Amino acid sequence: MSFKNIRGQDKAINILKNYIAQSRLLGSYILTGPEGVGKQLVALNLAKTLNCQDNGAEPCDACASCQKIDKNQHPDVHVIACADSQIQIEYIRQLQSRSSLKPYEGRVKVFIINDAHRLTAEASNALLKILEEPPKNTLIILITDKLNLLFKTIISRCKILRFSPLIRTELQEIISRDYGVDKASAHFLAYFSEGRLGCALRLKDTDILREKNRVIDAFGQSLTKTYENLNIQGKPEIRQNLNILA
Ligand SMILES: [Zn+2]
């Protein structure tokens, strides 16, 4: 997946592409915005672009480097995605020792820290030291949906790129057109996920649509009984109306 597949984040992506074009991308970045809007995809695409053997403005997605990054097997691209509630200093110590080495096979070492707001105070201070003297040929990307929980000193050392949810009608159109979701479900997913494409796509493959339809059916049946003498009798019509409200 390349930049063109990431929807609704053109502003942030264009800023980054300009940095790449001017060879000014290296350093430290914070990608911030709600969950499920494409921050991690953008970070991985940056890592791919900087190391792609095609050397273009977008990753080719086909070379050995792009494919290794997609499989999380590239020796110069490291994603810190800690399952614990906090990111301990050991992760940052590891980052520090890796960042002091030359790239193994790529052009640029990339470190992506997911949920950077979960860095402990100790880890934050250790990271700050690295950011104060950025290692050569290195890009450090912090990803967070809670920017206010990061140390102000860390924020001040990074370029900040803000990501936003899509307009819901736009998201509805995308998931309906590009992902083959029927119109009513696309409408529900777009609103339920509050405009976040990643969130909508995750929900698409869960039981939530079935559950929503079950609730609507049950509600529709009770409405049909209650209003059988009124002009709202057909379940499809009730479902359609409820979908509009969803
Ligand atoms: Zn490539």
Image (cartoon, helix red, strand yellow):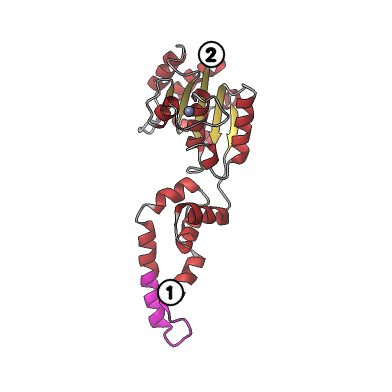
Task: Give the amino acid at mark 2.
Answer: Lys
Q: Please tell me whether residue 73 is drawn above or below residue 200 in the rendered image.
A: above
**Residue 57 within the segment the image draws in magenta:** no
Q: CA distance from mark 2 to mark 1?
A: 62 Å
Q: Does 131 sit above or below residue 217?
A: above
Relative placement, left or right, of 207 versus 41 is left
Q: Which residues are magenta?
A: 217-238
**Residue 75: x and y, percent?**
40, 20
Q: Which residue appears at 58% of the width and 52% of the height? A: 167
Tell me the residue at 45%/33% (across/down): 115
Residue 236 numbered tag: 1
Please provide percent x and percent y for residue 56: 56, 27
Q: Is residue 164 left or right of residue 175?
A: right
Q: Position of residue 198 (x, y in %)?
A: 46, 45
Magenta part mainly helix, strand or loop? helix
Ranked by sequence position, the earlier of labels 2 and 1 is: 2
Q: Residues within 10 Å of mark 1 (few under 14, many from 20)?
A: few
Residue 177 appears at what percent x and percent y?
Answer: 50, 55
Three-letter amino acid code at the position of disc 1: Pro
Q: Secondary structure at mark 1?
A: helix
Between 176 and 41, which is closer to the camera in this rendering?
176
Q: Is residue 227 magenta?
A: yes
Determine the secondary structure under disc 2. Answer: loop
10 Å crowding of disc 2: few (<14), some (14-19), many (20+): some
Residue where numbered disc 2 is placed? 136
Marks 2 and 1 in Cβ contact (< 8 Å): no
Residue 148 visible? The answer is no
